[in-house]
Amino acid sequence: MARILVTGGAGYIGSHTRYFLEKSGHSVVVVDDLSRGFKQAVPDGALHQVDTRDTAKLTSLMRQERIEAVIHFAAYISVGESTQRPELYFSNNVCGSLSLFEAMLEAQVKCLVFSSTAAAYGIPAKVPILEDEPYAPINPYGESKVMVEKILEWLDRYREFRSIRLRYFNACGAEPQSGLGERHDPETHLIPLMLRAIQTGKPVTLFGDDYPTPDGTCIRDYIHVSDLAQAHIVAIEHLLGGGKSDVFNVGTGAGQSVKQVLAAVEKVTGKKVPHTIGPRREGDPPSLVADSRKLQNVLGWRPERANLEQIVADAWAFAQNVTA
Ligand code: UDP
């Protein structure tokens, strides 16, 4: 069992991964600057409020806590915001990551799992998407993740710094046992916004119904956050066991349209989702679906909660608790 540093552990995917790491017997130290995360998502005593750009603090923390490996989530994630303030994204996501890697090298920690994104592919030529699809980001958020992926490729080549890059598709749902769930401020993601529309009566806007897809709305690959968390655990255990650097998509392989998500939300909640149809959102590719067979074949991971209604039910249980 290892001592693992989780950056961004007060965020949505980071907090779920911390929860499952501890369940698997690992010991976890969380770093989060709380600029976007929630203190309540981290158990008392585990949280260190540090900006990832503070290399010296990270180095001494890793030495003090005898850290053996790092899972790096800390980043800004909003595509829209990244087009308004690209500098913020390059500073936090790229400079923050580089600072963390320098601290790791200084502290002799050379195993990292990095949270990357399907946004690295931009508008892919082929769907389902394989990992060898070229980098083609179409917004500063995606570019910031690609820049870090490239830094990691060079560190692997020249510094024996091993890393697994996980390219997530659409994380959603919540782990019912954990009390954790999806909270962003502002919220921009489809499922929480649909649930909120039910709770508040304020309609959610569906961004475009004239895409070249069967029902005209965008198709995405919705992956349960607990399955995503498990992918990090198999990845870090692979590296701790001496495994080599690699990159993997993390999705279910099944695409769902915005209208199919709406139908699932209505079925699970038994309520109508107030909604309007609006224009397309800039930078939204028509269809993003992962080919995740590599992760299944190489690391033995399987999505166990791929059922959309299950995902929505878990998200709904959390949303009802939050407002209660
Ligand atoms: N979407 C929508 N209305 C919203 C938010 C999202 O129609 O208020 C659509 C969006 O265009 C995309 C899908 O829902 O096709 C998933 O978007 P989300 O922002 O959840 O994740 P993304 O795919 O951008 O990572």
Image: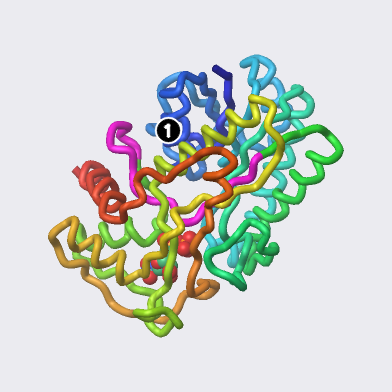
- Confirm whether the magenta stretch covers residue 155: no
Residue highlighted by disc 1: 39
Q: Residue 50 placed where, x, y %? A: 60, 31
Left or right of residue 21: residue 69: right
Which secondary structure lies at badge 1? Answer: helix
Q: Residue 192 placed where, x, y %? A: 32, 56
Residue nearest the viewer, comparing 268 with 38: 268
- Confirm whether the magenta stretch covers residue 167: yes
Give the residue furthest to the right.
158
Is residue 104 placed above or below 140 in the rendered structure?
A: above
Amino acid on which disc 1 is placed: Lys
Q: Residue 104 placed where, x, y %? A: 73, 29
Q: Quadrant of residue 58?
A: top right
Stretch in magenta: 164-180
Residue nearest the viewer, comparing 162 with 82: 162
Q: Say which quadrant the N terminus sits in.
A: top right
Q: Residue 211 placed where, x, y %? A: 44, 81
Q: Residue at x 54, y 68 (%)?
A: 127
Q: Residue at x 35, y 69 (%)?
A: 258
Residue nearest the viewer, comparing 45 with 22: 22
Render colour scheme: rainbow
Can the viewer see residue 141?
no
Quarter of the picture for ligand 1? bottom left
Assess mark 1: CB under 8 A from ligand 1? no
Can the viewer see residue 220?
yes
Is residue 140 placed above or below 4 in the rendered structure?
A: below
